[in-house]
Amino acid sequence: MAPAQVRYDADGVHAVLADLDRPCYIVSGGGRMGATSEPPHPGAGFTVLAAVAPQQPDRLGSAEFRRHHGVRYAYMTGAMAGGISCEDFVIAAARAGHLASFGAAGLPEARIDSALERLEHALGSTGVPYACNLIHNPMAPGQERACIDACLRHRVRCVEASAFVQLTPDLVRYRLAGLHRAQDPTGVRAEHRVVAKVSRPETAGLFLRPAPEELTAALVSDGRVTAEQAELARTVPLADDITVEADSGGHTDRRPLAVLLPAVIRLRDRAARENPATARVRVGAAGGIGTPEAVVAALALGAAYVVTGSVNQAATEAGTSPAVKRLLADAGLADCTMAPAADLFEQGVTVQVLARGTMFPGHASRLYRLYRDHDSLAALPPTERRYLEQRVLRRPLDEVWRDTADYLATHHPAWCERAERDHKFRMAVVFRWYLAMASRWAVTGEAARKGDWQIWCGPAMGAFNAWTAGTVLADPDRRHVTAIAHHLLHGAAFHARITQLQLAGVRLPAACAEYRLQS
């Protein structure tokens, strides 16, 4: 056997570690630490300190997740609302072997329908898997129903269910409509997959159990699912996968992943004692995934897969404006803040947004304070009214109300009627006009409203920028979604080996232990 070729220089050790297809042996000889890919043999003249196996990026995470969804990587690009995770974005990510979710939330029915039609032809017809986001909106259940109708019409096989605090008939209808008897140990084949995104253990519990009997019975009574499907549903958890969302952009409870993820995994394991089928529900991680080290940390905590969000909004294929992508590329770790949410404004719910380069967070917070402290638009102090009309809305309040009323009369007539008689509610919908438009101005890059852009963003964006500084991915024009995923996964595979060595007591010099991001 030929003697092992040991590399002792920093570049050489790094090269051995970065050769992810081969094993790596860290050795000591002559008072120096080195590395080799060759199996050592007796009498080689050095001592083996530790060894790590090959670690390909497509072997990270759960093999069952990859098999179940038909993807190459245990990596998902989460939906970004308003079509920011648009058709081009989903097509690029899906064809590269990732589970990509279309951002249907907040889009009109016609836009969702046309997008899913395109995805059906571009991906579904060739067997490439993808998903569509389904966001829970208790204020407008018709939007959820329209999204599910479009998913069924265009044979979407997976939905990413977000912001659910209770189960709804349409989500259950989607799950049950894909259930069939199967000749396998489970006895059930589920054509419709559900990936539930949650930020609380109690919400995760809803998806770990079978669909509630009262909902399935009502669906059978309405002829929306069959009696056989309702029977099969008794043994099938509502979700195939549960994504635990920690500190993220947009809606977030900002809980630490290290606390939340193990809690949901324990909940899943306890539930499996009563229903063995629950053991098959995989638990993934989202929120704060912006560096290879974050991917490794999530997997070490027990995540079956990882979901990226904020970093994808800066991707070249993302359906937001180039100017927004440039702002995101300059974001630091501390450049995010919380601001009132458009969909749950009256309840005081907030979303995490970019603070750098926009005055939206301050303007939105001012609107909520005024709503909280006053009973109507007419009750606003004259100085506050002038400030709103000149600095925030940049239009007379009466004009904004007329436009809002026209929209509500067409899309939500019950809301319009309520706003006509309830002046507090009228104030809420006028203020929500600004919050809704602020995200659209960002997507379209409305230059005149740059100071009002609402850009959903979490701290992962700042971490990503710090990691990619001085590299090819520092350039916003080169941040393709496939490049982002490639480097996160290859970097994670590299750092997984570094972590194993550290656990074995081996401390490598920094020059050897950092993934070198290249084009």
Image (cartoon, helix red, strand yellow):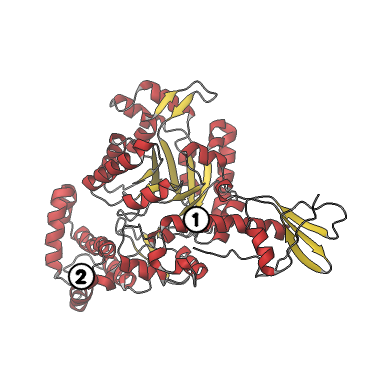
Residue 192 location, quadrant: top left
Up the image or down, 200 lies above or below 365; here it is above
In this rendering, which labeled residue sits more in front, label 1 or label 2? 1
State the residue lying farthest toward the bottom.
Answer: 383
- Residue at the spot x=39%, y=44% of the render? 161
Per the image, label 2 sits on a secondary structure element best described as loop
The label shown at residue 486 is 1
Q: Percent position (x, y) of residue 383?
A: 20, 79
Q: Percent position (x, y) of residue 57?
A: 56, 51
Amino acid, disc 1 = His
Residue 243 seen in this snapshot: yes
The answer to which of 495 and 15 lies nearer the viewer is 15
Q: Which residue is mark 2?
A: 393
Residue 258 seen in this snapshot: no
Q: CA distance from mark 1 to mark 2?
A: 42 Å
Drawn side of residue 492 relative to residue 159, left or right: right
